[in-house]
Image: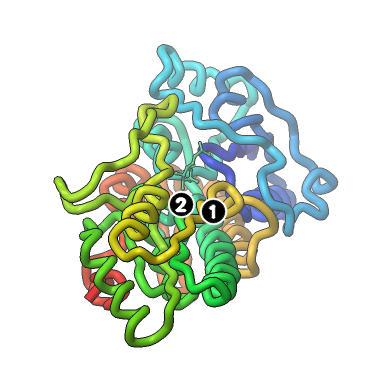
Amino acid sequence: MRLGILTGGGDCPGLNACIRAVVRCGADQGVTVLGFRDGWRGVLDGEAHQLTLEDVRGILPRGGTILGTSGTQPTLIEGGPDLVRDAIGVHALDGFIVVGGEGTMGASAAMDDVPVIGIPKTIDNDIGGTDASIGFWTAAQIATDSIDRLYSTAESHNRVMVCEVMGRTAGWIGITSGLAGGADVIVIPEHAFDIEAICRRIRRIHSERRPFSIVVISEGAAPVPGTMELPEYTLDANGWPRLGGIGRLVADEINRRTRSETRVTTLGHVQRGGTPVAFDRVLATRLGVAAVDQAVAGRWGNLVGIRGADIQTTPLVEVGARASVVPPERFGIPEILCT
Ligand code: F6P
């Protein structure tokens, strides 16, 4: 058997652990693995090389991806799906293992005659068919560590510290790091925020408990319509808004309304870099092994994910419809509702 592997979309910690698992598990079962450069771009441009055990030695703890990545979606390029089909013949492949996010999975599902097994990765954790995607828990830990650091400087200066985290339209990094770091206010995209309620809560904390506070805000958070401006977002190559900046607007407004000295920290891409935490290494390894097993069994067209402690599969065509966001029952936490 010959498999192609690619990593698509934004990088995250744990991709190399996954590539290693696919190559090593493949070698055990007599499967040759070809690595394509920069996601689907390498498939379209025919840039691939065989991955050996030597290539993957020592990469388990390394951040990023040895294959490179890109946001290229064959389905958005004229003739793209045909080039993908041609690549199967040119490289004598049985199919692809695609490690990607929502966009990459969507493109894979749309090419339903191309044999693909999907592995979910993204720090945003917004992919359907899995409880966790590779990279999420590392990003959540990095954000938590950052909040711990902001806490001590907030305390020294009696300041409000606003920490903007990534996550696109899902609040998983925000709610997880906010709760783990003991934030006073958590603002996530799934629940429109009321800036006055946030300020009320900050005033109350400062007068009743302590004169400093921590606000965690997800980059995709939005105010109740008509109450505050949003940043002006430009669009990326795939037409998605490039988020970032809501933390600055909220910090300015808190400063103006509460008269508390306020600072903003935008964590940005630091959440995507560096070595994966143990959970992501194990998840990446288990999903890599499961993907090879699926391929060897000829079960194409599925995403391999984790539900509880178990590996489960979901048809790729259903993954998009089940995008994962923070469910409403979690909004009852007072820090989120600003009660
Ligand atoms: O999807 C992962 C992610 O890090 C989002 O959280 C963020 O909005 C986006 O990618 C940033 O994209 P880029 O690396 O293209 O700036």
Q: Quadrant of the N terminus?
A: top right
Q: Residues within 10 Å of mark 2 (few under 14, many from 20)?
A: many
Q: Residues within 10 Å of mark 1 (few under 14, many from 20)?
A: some
Seen at 53% across and 73% down, the residue is 151
Q: Earlier in the sequence, mark 1 or mark 2?
A: 2
What residue sits right under mark 1 in the picture?
A: 267
Locate residue 132 relative to residue 27 in the image: left or right.
Answer: left
How far separated are the C-alphas under marks 1 and 2? 8 Å
Seen at 68% across and 54% down, the residue is 274
Whole-percent x, y for residue 8 in the image: 54, 37
Locate residue 2 relative to residue 263 in the image: left or right.
Answer: right
Q: Quadrant of residue 148?
A: bottom right
Q: Which mark is residue 230?
A: none
Whole-percent x, y for residue 209 in the image: 38, 86
Amino acid type for the residue under numbered disc 1? Leu
Q: Nearer the viewer, residue 16 or 137?
A: 137
Q: Are marks 1 and 2 in contact (CB under 8 Å)?
A: yes
Q: How many marks?
A: 2
Tell which residue pokes out farthest to the right in this image: 54
Q: Which mark is residue 166?
A: 2
Q: Nearer the viewer, residue 292 or 255?
A: 255
Q: Nearer the viewer, residue 205 or 108?
A: 205
Amino acid type for the residue under numbered disc 2? Met
Locate residue 124 relative to residue 254 in the image: left or right.
Answer: right
Q: Quadrant of the C terminus?
A: bottom left
**Mark 1 or 2, which is nearer the eye?**
1
Is the residue at mark 2 in contact range of ligand 1, meaning its CB lies under 8 Å from it? Answer: yes
Q: Quadrant of residue 284?
A: bottom right
Locate residue 177 relative to residue 202 in the image: left or right.
Answer: right
Whole-percent x, y for residue 225 in the image: 16, 47
Helix, strand or loop for disc 1: loop
Seen at 40% across and 32% down, the residue is 107
